[in-house]
Amino acid sequence: MKKIELHWKIIIGMVLGLIFGFILLQFEGGKNFSNNWIKPVGTIFIKLLKLIAIPLILASLIKGISDLKDISKFKLIGLRTIIVYICTTIIAISIGLILVNIFEPGDGVSAETVSKLTDTYSESKGVQQKLSTASEQKSIGPLQFIEDVVPDNAFKAFSDNRLMLQVIFVSIFLGISMLLIGDDKSKPLKSIFDSLNDVVLKMVDLIMLTAPYAVFALLANVVVSSDDSEILMALLKYALIIVFGLIIMIAVYSILVFLFTKTNPVWFLKQISPAQLLAFSTSSSAATLPVTMDRVEKYIGVDKEVSSFVLPVGATINMDGTSLYQAVAAVFICQALAFDISFYDQLTIVLTALLASIGTAAVPGAGMVMLVIVLESIGFPADKLAIGIALIFAVDRPLDMFRTVVNITGDATVSMIVANSVGKYSKK
Ligand code: ASP
């Protein structure tokens, strides 16, 4: 019998999970059953992926850098990565703004819907939590972000998944120093990291064997914990505009891949699809990172020297899907609550959404926290923030799933473009 390809197995798992979730909803106690017996399967899977993220970054980045023949190439890779990341994010925000201005989804929201959503969510724990996290973020100074990249204790950095940029910093520092002391002296350490790298990649393979079952659990749980369908329908136009924008972004990546690397975009999307499906199921670029790296290196052909830097950095700072969402959501909220915004405000959104997406953590729902900061930058009244966030809260989870797919596809695209530009891409 022909072996079913991994992405098909994952898709089958997802569809069955959705169906199972709907079946559970028909039973009283179905939600409880899911919480007790289904949800843990998905949670364990995400934990396993996160478990190997830091060893993987450490091993592959150190291997990548210490394999480089000269450091100047690394500078080139770093600079190009940042420039292309910023460009794709600006494209994403612009697409979002154009769509939300053309279709004006917020203007069609009735006062009745606004008050219903406000009553349901503005005092809810979820919304209040987002607001308080946002105000914590806001009190941080402008250079704090750079300061935070440098750890004062390497082991502390390795012990917290949220400190990914610190892990990247330590790995680059170590890798470059290994290059500088020369092959002879760095050889023993290099062999350790090379071997660790192979072991961790095997762990990714093993974890991926369980992916179809895990996505079943994750999606069943999304269905049972979703809000009632009437509320979801009220936000349908808004949600569809975001999804439409995200699809355009995938088309943009396809064009970029074709133009810059002469690779067939359909082939590219097929190779990256298991990572996309996991991004969809987990809503976390950080949890998906090991799989994104695996696909980009083994199946697409980007050299580790590039991918080991571009992808972890991208997972933390490059979020095109999130920034598109933030642009649409900010303008949607203003439209729905009749808060006038000028062209200048929209330009402010481009800038703050760019910075916000850089500062957004690669975990579920983080994009919404930074949305608060985007809204504040255009003078949105502080006392209405809870209402604004309440408006879009119900559809945040499904939209998070879609935008995370775009986030990781963007990272993969940029890694190919940068790798190709320094002669480190050879199509598999
Ligand atoms: N869940 C997204 C990610 O991990 C971030 C967000 O938009 O909330 O990429």
Image (cartoon, rainbow, N blue to C red):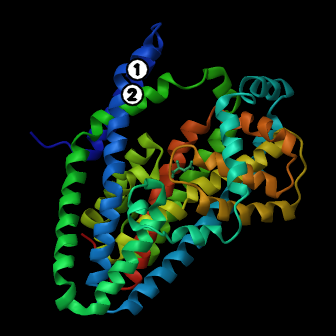
**Is 28 displayed left or right of 272 in the figure?**
right
Q: Nearer the viewer, residue 227 or 151?
A: 151
Left or right of 49 in this view: 315 = right
Which element carries disc 1, helix, strand or loop? helix
Which one is earlier in the sequence, the residue at label 1 or at label 2? 1
Location of the C terminus (image quadrant) = bottom left
Amino acid identity at mark 1: Ser
Label 2: which secondary element = helix
* Residue 185 disc label: none
- Rendered-image quadrant of the N terminus: top left
Asked whether the beta carbons under mark 1 and mark 2 sit within 8 Å of each other, the answer is yes
> In the rendered image, which residue does mark 1 sit on?
34
Structural crowding at the residue carrying mark 1, measured as other residues with C-alpha within 10 Å and reported as few (<14), some (14–19) or many (≥20): many
Instruction: Say which residue appears at 82% left-offset and 39% top-offset.
Output: 336
Residue 345 percent across, percent down from the top left: 84, 60
Q: Which mark is residue 39?
A: 2
Q: Circle 2: is it few (<14), some (14-19), or many (20+) Cα within 10 Å?
A: many
